[in-house]
Amino acid sequence: MGLEFIPIFKEWAKEYDETVAGHDPEYAEVFANYSEMLTMITEKAGQNVLEFGSGTGNLTIALLKAGKTVFPVEPSAEMRDLAKEKPELAGIDFLAGDMENFPLPAGNIDTIVANFVFHHLNGIEKKRALQKYAVLLPKGGKVIIGDTMFVSQMRFDDTITTAINTGKETLAADLQREYYPLLPNLENYFHEAGFTVKFWQINSFAWIAEAVKR
């Protein structure tokens, strides 16, 4: 369920927006083109959106500004509190939950989104979550995932080695600790759950996966 990483976000919450804005040298490359990523996810999303790992509400704001109805779900109380402090999110109900266990939205949804969140699930959990999302969505409904992903295990291993050799110890530990997906594996998970999927590369770390229920 990814809840083992909640303590990390308790510490990171206050610096999160600064990090995604590129102000942390270790993660600047990871979050390059972050604004463009939010825009792309928003443009691909339908009208009624279930958002997992809403964090401090950056994607939530983009979706709301585009006129979408958003049901944001976030397991970290610290992240939810920071999101509620933003004027653009006044009155928005941030739901407590995670990518597998969450309250169902009051209305029907046509899109599920998650940005820099899906890597908290291991492979078994990823498969299980996508199968659950397939049940929730209508035919033609979408799952849109933005995250750090890798085209191959060799590329993943090389990235870790480079991080270590360049003194980016926090980034290297992060890459080794969590469950960053390989594109071929994620493609298989989507197909098994009944989706077609396309990928777009955002930077040397991040990709967007747009999956459509068959």
Image (tube, grey):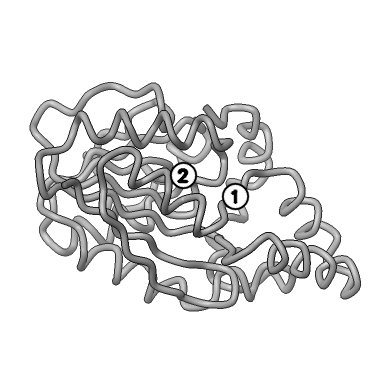
Query: In the image shown, does 165 or 139 lie closer to the viewer?
Result: 139
Residue 211 position, x and y percent, is 28, 54
Examine the image and state in which quarter residue 105 appears.
top left
Q: Quadrant of residue 178?
A: top right
Callout 2: 10 Å neighbours few (<14), some, many (20+)? Answer: some
Could you tell me if the residues under marks 1 and 2 are in contact, i.e. CB atoms within 8 Å?
yes
Q: Residue at x 46, y 50 (%)?
A: 186
Image location of residue 84, percent across then percent down? 36, 42
Q: Quadrant of residue 200?
A: bottom left
Any mark on residue 1, and which?
none
Residue at disc 1, secondary structure: helix
Task: Answer left or right for 81 relative to 123.
Answer: left
Write down the residue under mark 2.
82
Taking the image as shown, residue 34 lies to the left or right of residue 163, namely left
152 lies left or right of 56: right
Most foreground residue, 145 or 29: 145
Residue under numbered circle 1:
14
